[in-house]
Amino acid sequence: MKMRKKILAVDDEPANLEIIKEALSEHYDLRTASTGEEALEIAPEFIPDLIVLDIMMPGIDGYEVCQRLREDLDFKSTPIIMVTAKTKSEEMIEGMKAGAEDYITKPFEVEDLMESIEFFFPSSEHVSGKT
């Protein structure tokens, strides 16, 4: 039996993580982190197929988390979707330079997040080849 795709969601706002949990936990193996440091600890053990990453967090921000993950061969090609209240194009470009594949602004609609995830995981692919 194949395992469900794994998603790591990182956000320092508990309400945002709860929305993400409600939207994704039925279809995906979901883990959450509330800090950049926690995300960097969880990711190597969990090996997510996709990461939903807030930018503005205390301590290590989302840009740095993204850059550090990209330095690890296990995460070179893992899709990263940045979620943030930052809306300026310069900030979006900074996220892409850090290694993100997509960028969603807050407040976000669950449908927008699901659409972005479905881009990386076509609906028939809720299962992972990773073990």
Image (spheres, rainbow, N blue to C red):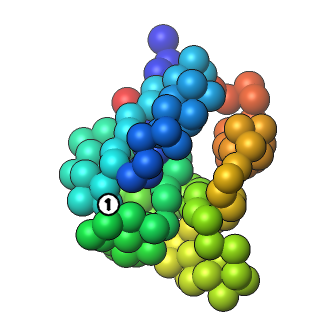
With respect to residue 97, does 103 lie above or below? above
The residue drawn where x is 45% and y is 68% is 56
Instruction: Give the SS element for disc 1.
Output: helix
Q: Position of residue 126 (x, y in %)?
A: 62, 26
* Residue 96 visible somewhere in the drawing: no
**Picture quarter containing residue 36?**
bottom left
Q: Position of residue 96 (x, y in %)?
A: 61, 76
**Residue behind mark 1:** 36
View extreme (top): residue: 1
With respect to residue 101, does 119 lie above or below? above
Looking at the figure, which quarter contains the C terminus? top left
Task: Answer with left or right where residue 38 lies relative to residue 114.
Answer: left
Task: Answer with left or right where residue 66 lies relative to residue 83.
Answer: left
Depth order, front residue of 126/65: 65
The residue drawn where x is 58% and y is 63% is 84
Q: Position of residue 117 (x, y in %)?
A: 67, 43
**Picture quarter containing residue 106?**
bottom right
The residue drawn where x is 62% and y is 72% is 86
* Residue 86 visible somewhere in the drawing: yes
The residue drawn where x is 44% and y is 74% is 63
Q: Position of residue 72 (x, y in %)?
A: 32, 66
Amino acid carrying label 1: it is Gly
Mark 1 closeness class: few <14, some 14–19, many ≥20 residues within 10 Å: many
Q: How many marks?
A: 1
Depth order, front residue of 45/107: 107
View extreme (bottom): residue: 90
